[in-house]
Amino acid sequence: MYILRCADRTTYVGSTWNLERRLAEHELGHGGAYTSKRLPVELAYCEEFARIDEAWAREKQIQNWSRAKREALIVADWLGLANAAKKRFG
C-alpha cells in the first residue's frame, strides 16, 4: 500500500504487487486518471503486506481518512493521527 503526494499537494492512495513498477507508471502518466493530471508525483509513504488483499484493505481504509489523518500518518505523527481520528461534536 502506498501514498503518493501529487504536484497540487493532494494525496493518492493505492496498492500494488510491484511498487517500483507502479511508481514508474504513475510518473509516466499511466498510473490513473487522478495522478496523470497532477504530475509530478512522489512517494510519500508505503507499507508492505504479505498478501495483496491485506494491502487492498489498508488502501480502502486510508482512502476514507481525512487529509489531516493521512498527513499525520505520512510524517509518523502518532499523536496527530490519534487526534485526527477523534470525532468532533458541536
Image (cartoon, rainbow, N blue to C red):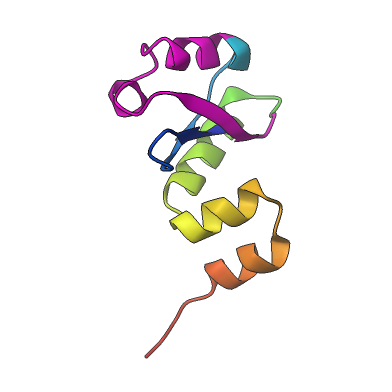
Q: Is residue 76 visible?
A: yes
* Image quadrant where one finds the C terminus: bottom left
**Quadrant hosting residue 19:** top right
Q: Is residue 37 above or below residue 12?
A: above
Where residue 40 sits: x, y (%)? 44, 23
- Measured along the vertical axis of the image, is residue 80 above or below residue 66? below
At x 64%, y 24%, the residue is 51
Compared across the picture, whether 8 is left or right of 57 comes to: left
The picture places residue 21, in percent across and down from the top left corner, at 56, 8
User: Is residue 10 part of the magenta span, yes or no?
Assistant: no
Q: Quadrant of the N terminus?
A: top right
**Does the stretch in magenta take in 43?**
yes
> In the image, 16: left or right of 36?
right
Q: Which residues are magenta?
A: 21-48
Q: Position of residue 42 (x, y in %)?
A: 54, 28
Q: Give the residue at x 47% y 77%.
A: 87
Q: Kindly indicate the quadrant of the structure image that contains residue 66.
A: bottom left
Query: Vertical placement of 13 versus 74: above or below?
Result: above
Frontmost residue, 3 versus 56 = 3
Q: Which residue does the image show at 69% across and 29% down from the upper left?
A: 49
Q: Is residue 60 above or below residue 37?
A: below
- Count of numbered circles in the view: 0
Answer yes or no: is residue 1 visible.
Answer: no
At 56% from the left and 40% from the top, the residue drawn is 58
Q: Nearer the viewer, residue 63 or 39?
A: 39
